[in-house]
Image (cartoon, grey):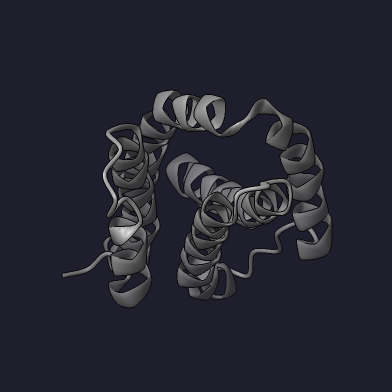
């Protein structure tokens, strides 16, 4: 196995694990939201994270990769989400606005390391971040259709 292949497999496993943790995080955030509309948005983001994780599961199987225990990953996400829920909606959205675009670099790097035949699944993974960024941008702008990119992603996998 080449260094690039080893790095790719390491990154693939890590990013999968982060999506599982992210789903736990968003669900915990939803539980901590007193506003039903905002809680629903957090649950929708959790669904997007779960969808992205499921999209790359066939690649984990293909390469015989064993991620960390899913229950433990969810528990880690939930613990962090409970702590972060105290920040309040506006602070969370601003934080997401600052951090989410940084993940695009990571996904681009993963795709660069990937064998060509893995790109369809990885494009679905990358598309989830694009949808989340679009949601956050719309939310900051006060657009009433802020969740449209998330629902579109769940309906299409980001592929149009």
Would residue 9 appear left or right of 128 to someone viewing this image? right
Q: Which picture quadrant has residue 4? A: top left
Is residue 66 or residue 101 the one in the foreground?
A: 101
Q: Could you tell me which residue is drawn at 82 percent across and 63 percent down?
A: 71
Is residue 17 or residue 101 the one in the foreground?
A: 101
Q: Residue furthest left?
A: 160
Q: Could you tell me which residue is drawn at 47 percent across and 32 percent down?
A: 93
Q: Quadrant of the C terminus?
A: bottom left
Q: Which picture quadrant has residue 87? A: top right
Give residue 67's position: percent from left, percent from top.
70, 59
Q: Could you tell me which residue is drawn at 32 percent across and 52 percent down?
A: 131
* Position of 23 relative to 50 (above/below): above
Q: Could you tell me which residue is drawn at 60 percent across and 49 percent down?
A: 35
Give residue 108's position: percent from left, percent from top.
32, 41
Residue 115 can be seen, yes or no: no
Would residue 130 appear left or right of 110 to someone viewing this image? left
How many marks overall?
0
Give residue 94's position: percent from left, percent from top.
46, 25
Would residue 83 appear left or right of 64 to someone viewing this image? right
Would residue 68 appear left or right of 101 to someone viewing this image? right
* Position of 130 relative to 153 (above/below): above
Q: Residue furthest front?
A: 35
Give residue 78's position: percent from left, percent from top.
77, 49
Residue 77 can be seen, yes or no: yes
Is residue 98 or residue 12 the one in the foreground?
A: 98
* Position of 97 relative to 154 (above/below): above
């Amino acid at each position: 196995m080449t260094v690039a292949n080893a790095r790719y497999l390491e990154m693939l496993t890590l990013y999968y694990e982060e999506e599982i943790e992210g789903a736990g995080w968003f669900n915990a955030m939803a539980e901590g939201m007193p506003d039903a509309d905002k809680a629903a948005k957090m649950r929708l983001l959790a669904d997007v994270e779960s969808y992205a994780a499921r999209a790359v599961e066939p690649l984990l199987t293909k390469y015989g990769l064993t991620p960390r225990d899913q229950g433990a990953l969810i528990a880690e996400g939930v613990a962090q989400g409970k702590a972060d829920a105290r920040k309040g909606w506006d602070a969370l959205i601003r934080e997401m606005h600052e951090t989410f675009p940084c993940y695009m670099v990571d996904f681009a790097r993963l795709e660069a390391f990937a064998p060509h035949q893995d790109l369809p699944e990885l494009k679905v993974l990358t598309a989830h971040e694009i949808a989340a960024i679009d949601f956050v941008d719309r939310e900051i702008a006060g657009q009433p259709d802020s969740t449209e990119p998330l629902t579109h992603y769940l309906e299409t996998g980001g592929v149009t």
